[in-house]
């Protein structure tokens, strides 16, 4: 017992410098950023030697989500949601598909693996520059039909002003409730076969209840808190989405391919002897075993989708509102407009969004470790 206590004390002493540095340079700076977001630091005198910082509470956050000047931030926030959803669906789906093909051991497997993984070695700046040339209105992708005798495309990949899937910002709470209910219902159907009682109690019934409440009581939700304005999916973001999926599908391919390699060949042979073909093997055996890899990919790609500043800056520049992102908005607000308080508020919003992805994952990990 004494030896164990001494070991714990030694371990704590060895870790203490790292704990102090992390507490100071990570959590200390996060706390300082939050404090700045509660002040009015900005304007002409923001760069003075001793700037005046008056406490204003949550005023900066209220203006971001309800003020007239916060329209750009709200559209950027909508863009970030679409960037995240498209990146997750595209990179995970394409990476999984390529990994399955390579796991079947085709000829030239090593060459294909290198080709698909190569984009990961490039920085966002290089990727953005390459794709900006490829998506130029008078060249690149738009010229592909001419090789088959057709007319060139006229789609403006990075400068289009057309938007689809538009919605009124006042209905945001109702839309979020609909999305939440649909997600819970889908999870319920996914887990229905394993544990019907648990699926109905934890997912299906609450999901249907939330949907019914949003449908019946939607008009009574606090719509007056928000500006009445229309936001949607800007088609100019398609080019950026294509570029980031191209870069990170190879990463998810590598994750899944490593997972497939770790599955015992005896398990695959047993599945084949039981009458399973390749489709059934991957659907019922391989992919369920790689659930931790899928969760890790979702967490990592979600964080990457919140840090797309350099890719967007390289492809469309800082002043294209149709392809904006909160990270880019934070840069412009802080270092161009010298509005440090509002820039700090945008940073805290991004931090909160990031934690919504990582905290459930950490809780689930600790629960799994605590099980016997």
Image (tube, rainbow, N blue to C red):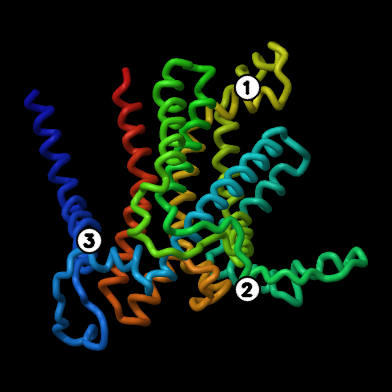
Which image quadrant is residue 72 in?
bottom left
SS at mark 1? helix
SS at mark 2? loop
Q: Along the horizontal axis of the image, is 88 left or right of 76?
A: right
Q: Along the horizontal axis of the image, is 30 left or right of 10?
A: right
**Residue position marked by numbered label 2 in the rendering:** 159
Q: Quadrant of the N terminus?
A: top left
Mark 1 vs mark 3, CA separation in Å: 47 Å
Furthest toward the top, the residue is 274
Q: Residue at x 64, y 20 (%)?
A: 268
Res. 265 mark: 1
Residue 297: give x, y in percent of width and height: 49, 43
**Residue position marked by numbered label 3 in the rendering:** 25
Say which of 180 and 293 sits in front: 180
Do the CB atoms of the residues marked 2 and 3 lie less than 8 Å apart? Answer: no
Q: Earlier in the sequence, mark 2 or mark 3?
A: 3
Mark 2 vs mark 3, CA separation in Å: 39 Å
Q: Earlier in the sequence, mark 1 or mark 3?
A: 3
Furthest toward the right, the residue is 149
Furthest toward the left, the residue is 2
Mark 2 vs mark 1, CA separation in Å: 50 Å
Q: Nearer the viewer, mark 2 or mark 1?
A: 2
Using a 10 Å C-alpha cutoff, classify the residue at mark 1 as few (fewer than 14 neighbours), some (14 to 19) or many (20 or more): few
Which image quadrant is residue 142 in?
bottom right
Q: Residue at x 29, y 24 (%)?
A: 370
Q: Nearer the viewer, mark 2 or mark 3?
A: 2
Residue 276: give x, y in percent of width and height: 70, 18
Q: Quadrant of the C terminus?
A: top left
Using a 10 Å C-alpha cutoff, classify the residue at mark 3 as few (fewer than 14 neighbours), some (14 to 19) or many (20 or more): few
SS at mark 3? helix
């Amino acid at each position: 017992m004494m030896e164990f206590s001494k070991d714990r004390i030694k371990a704590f002493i060895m870790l203490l410098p790292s704990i102090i540095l992390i507490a100071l340079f990570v959590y200390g700076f996060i706390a300082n950023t939050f404090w700045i977001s509660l002040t009015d630091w900005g304007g002409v005198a923001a760069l003075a030697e001793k700037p005046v910082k008056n406490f204003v509470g949550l005023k900066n956050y209220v203006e971001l989500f309800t003020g007239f000047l916060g329209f750009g931030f709200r559209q950027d926030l909508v863009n970030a949601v679409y960037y995240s959803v498209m990146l997750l669906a595209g990179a995970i789906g394409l990476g999984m598909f390529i990994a399955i093909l390579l796991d079947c051991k085709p000829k030239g497997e090593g060459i294909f693996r290198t080709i698909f993984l190569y984009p990961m070695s490039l920085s966002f700046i290089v990727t953005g520059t390459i794709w900006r040339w490829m998506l130029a209105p008078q060249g690149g992708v738009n010229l592909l039909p001419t090789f088959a005798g057709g007319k060139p495309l006229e789609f403006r990949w990075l400068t289009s002003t057309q938007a689809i899937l538009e919605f009124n910002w006042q209905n945001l709470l109702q839309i979020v409730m609909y999305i939440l209910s649909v997600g819970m219902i889908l999870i319920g159907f996914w887990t229905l076969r394993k544990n019907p009682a648990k699926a109905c109690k934890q997912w299906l019934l609450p999901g249907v209840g939330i949907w019914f409440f949003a449908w019946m009581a939607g008009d009574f939700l606090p719509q007056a808190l928000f500006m009445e304005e229309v936001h949607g999916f800007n088609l100019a973001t398609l080019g950026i989405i294509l570029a980031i999926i191209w870069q990170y599908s190879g990463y998810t391919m590598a994750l899944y391919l490593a997972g497939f390699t770790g599955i015992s060949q005896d398990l695959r042979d047993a599945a084949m002897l039981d009458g399973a073909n390749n489709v059934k093997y991957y659907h019922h055996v391989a992919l369920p075993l790689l659930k931790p890899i899928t969760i890790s990919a979702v967490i990592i790609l979600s964080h990457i989708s919140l840090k797309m500043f350099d890719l967007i800056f390289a492809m469309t520049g800082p002043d294209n509102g149709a392809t904006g992102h909160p990270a880019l908005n934070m840069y412009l607000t802080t270092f161009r407009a010298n509005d440090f308080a509002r820039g700090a508020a945008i940073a805290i919003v991004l931090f909160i969004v990031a934690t919504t992805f990582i905290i459930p994952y950490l809780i689930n990990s600790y629960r799994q470790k605590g099980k016997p």
